[in-house]
Amino acid sequence: ALSFSIQRSIDGVLSTRLPQPVAAASIAFEITSVRGDDASLDRAARFFVEGFWAASTTTDTGGALTDRDRDQLAALQRDDMIARYGETVGARRLRSSLFVAEDPSSGAIAGCVGVEMALVDPSRGRVLSRAQSEKL
């Protein structure tokens, strides 16, 4: 397996470090694109809540989320994922996908990553929002 990093210098120039070998994982994960149905996005949203919010050191409750907190965060996260990666009535102009890595023996989610195409306004040096980009 290879690892690489992208760094921004003081003058804003991006550079890449050469790939470095890393230890291979003992588990081979199955990586699939989530289709955008409610059940698969709900599962990914709950995984994200556990990995990001429940494991966070920034919560003022000492990291302990109640079941109600988890349900509310999962609902908000699912709604965001549906807007970003869910199936739409019309075709999206800018594609997006949510990928999930699962342990094939247990079906447990090990990680997820969202990928979205975006437009950049080079004169202002900023990324346009999804809504702005889709209108162009």
Image: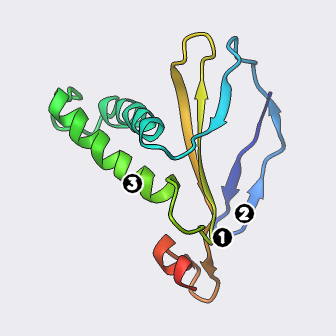
At horizontal 65% and vertical 70% (from top left) the residue drawn is 12
1 and 2 marks in contact (CB < 8 Å) = yes
Say which of marks 3 and 2 sits in front. Answer: 3
How far, Cα to Cα, is label 1 from label 3?
31 Å
The amino acid on which the numbered mark 3 sits, given as a three-letter code, is: Asp
8 relative to 36 in the view: left or right: right
Report the disc number at residue 12.
Answer: 1
Q: Position of residue 35 (x, y in %)?
A: 57, 44
Image quarter in which the N terminus is found: top right
At horizontal 48% and vertical 36% (from top left) the residue drawn is 40
Q: Earlier in the sequence, mark 3 or mark 2?
A: 2
At horizontal 35% and vertical 46% (from top left) the residue drawn is 77
* Residue at the spot of label 3: 80
* Residue at the spot of label 2: 14
Q: Earlier in the sequence, mark 1 or mark 3?
A: 1
Q: Position of residue 59 (x, y in %)?
A: 23, 38
- Whether 19 is drawn above or below 114: the answer is above
The amino acid on which the numbered mark 1 sits, given as a three-letter code, is: Gly
* 76 vs 90, nearest the viewer: 90
At horizontal 75% and vertical 18% (from top left) the residue drawn is 24
